[in-house]
Image: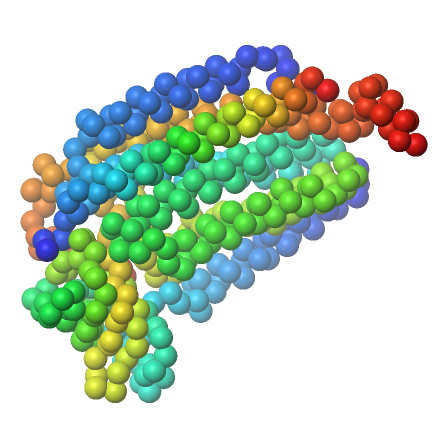
Amino acid sequence: MNGTITGGWGFVWSAYGLTAFFLTAYAVSLFVRLRNERSR
Amino acid sequence: MTPNHRFPRAPYALLALGVILLLLGSYLGLFVAPPEHFMGDVQRIMYVHVPTAWNALLAMTFALVCAIAFLFRGDFRWDARMEAAIEVGVLLAFLLCCQGAIWAKPTWGVWWDWDPRLTTTAVLLFAFIGILALRRFVDDPVRRATWSAVATIIAYADVPIVYYSVTWWNSLHQLQSSPATVSKSFHLPLRMNAFAILFLMTGFIMLRARLASLRLEHELAPPPHELDAVGELA
Amino acid sequence: MNRSRLFLIIAIAVAAIGFTIIAASGINKNLVYYWTPSDLHKAGDKAYGATIRLGGQVLPGSVHHQSGSALDFDVTDKHQTVHVKSTGIPPQMFREGIGVVVEGTMTREGFFQSERLMVSHNNEYRSPKDGQAVDAKKLIESTKGVDVK
């Protein structure tokens, strides 16, 4: 144990993956909701 | 009636710009910037976590401006913008907590702890979720807008508390960093992603405000075929 | 219209009052996340038995590894020192001189028994190149993540 973190790419990928997923999902939901409202 | 109708393509351009910048900034952060001295590669989470934090607080701040403008002017375009800013702010605050937990596990050793910074951030998230819920339960547009504007102004008091939480109380979360405490080689990806998420946030808020305005229009003057449906029911 | 401006004033007043109360309690340290070794010494008998968090710096030279993940070390705030026996798995960042927050209880035997060991890093992020320029002594002094006065 020398006080430094080795590895941990799994954490990095989860953080970026989660962010990308939710931003994309929000964009999709926004487009769908807008389209539905416009076609009313 | 619809906000930003003069520039119908502006939000899409902002979203496109945001995506490109986010890909570029994240590429630099993940593959070009050096690992941190002690945290190693895990520190790369900073390039998405810190921009998310800044922009979440910015979205809440814009919601506050909209709330004040609505109560002052009574213009429903401000109500639509406020609803948009709160929803996008909630999305970012939620992502912020998730990213923070993922970063905390390898560095602090725990996913979460009720330290002042984390607690006040969770309060902020749930307060604004509460305002979105409140809007769903109030049918009268004037009351809905007024009450949620009042609630937004009150909930916003938590934003400076979140910011100062690390200096007012002892906490597990470190103090605010500044350019002086962050190596120069980390600055570029951090700034690129900050602007990337700013553009995404602005694009989202503009589109979401359009949706809110359209919904209000349809609420006040339902489209003819829906009136027919109401007539058949009656 | 006038009514909504009245609402505006009331809302701002409520927000300002709430903010002031919390800010004042923060400055008075009425709300406490962790106790420092000095707080623990001052508390006397009140420190025993209750589950509390203790925060401070790992005293350089005090870390002893026991069997498994168990660890012994001293937590200091430069005025007082508390001996800690920890059974929790230490995070990789754990090292001498770093800030820690431990959760557990103070025992009558005079040591702090902890089951949860958290590392509190400071607000500095350095590339390895800068890191080599910073000597270890300076790093130990700069564990601002935990208040060391």
Instruction: State the residue in front, B79 or B110.
Output: B110
Q: How many marks?
A: 0
- At a point 26% along the width and 83% down the height, the residue shown is C107
- At a point 40% along the width and 67% down the height, the residue shown is C32
Indicate whether C126 appears above or below B110. Answer: above
Residue at the outermost front position? B232
Please say whether residue C34 is visible from this viewpoint.
yes
Quadrant location, the C terminus of chain C: bottom left
Indicate whether B89 appears above or below C14. Answer: above
On the image, the x and y values in percent for residue B154 come to 61, 50
On the image, the x and y values in percent for residue B228 come to 87, 22
Query: What colouring style does the render use?
Result: rainbow
Query: In this image, A29 relative to B232: left or right?
Result: left
Q: Quadrant of residue C89?
A: bottom left
Please say whether residue C145 is visible from this viewpoint.
no
Instruction: State the residue in front, B6 or B141.
Output: B141
Instruction: State the residue in front, B21 or A27.
Output: A27
Quadrant location, the N terminus of chain C: top right
Indicate whether C129 appears above or below B150. Answer: above
- At a point 27% along the width and 69% down the height, the residue shown is C115
Query: In this image, B45 relative to C66: left or right?
Result: right
On the image, the x and y values in percent for residue A4 come to 14, 49
Indicate whether B8 appears above or below C148. Answer: above
Query: In this image, B45 relative to C98: left or right?
Result: right
Query: In this image, B78 relative to B230: left or right?
Result: left
On the image, the x and y values in percent for residue B187 come to 26, 31
- At a point 15% along the width and 45% down the height, the residue shown is A6
Q: Quadrant of residue B181?
A: top left
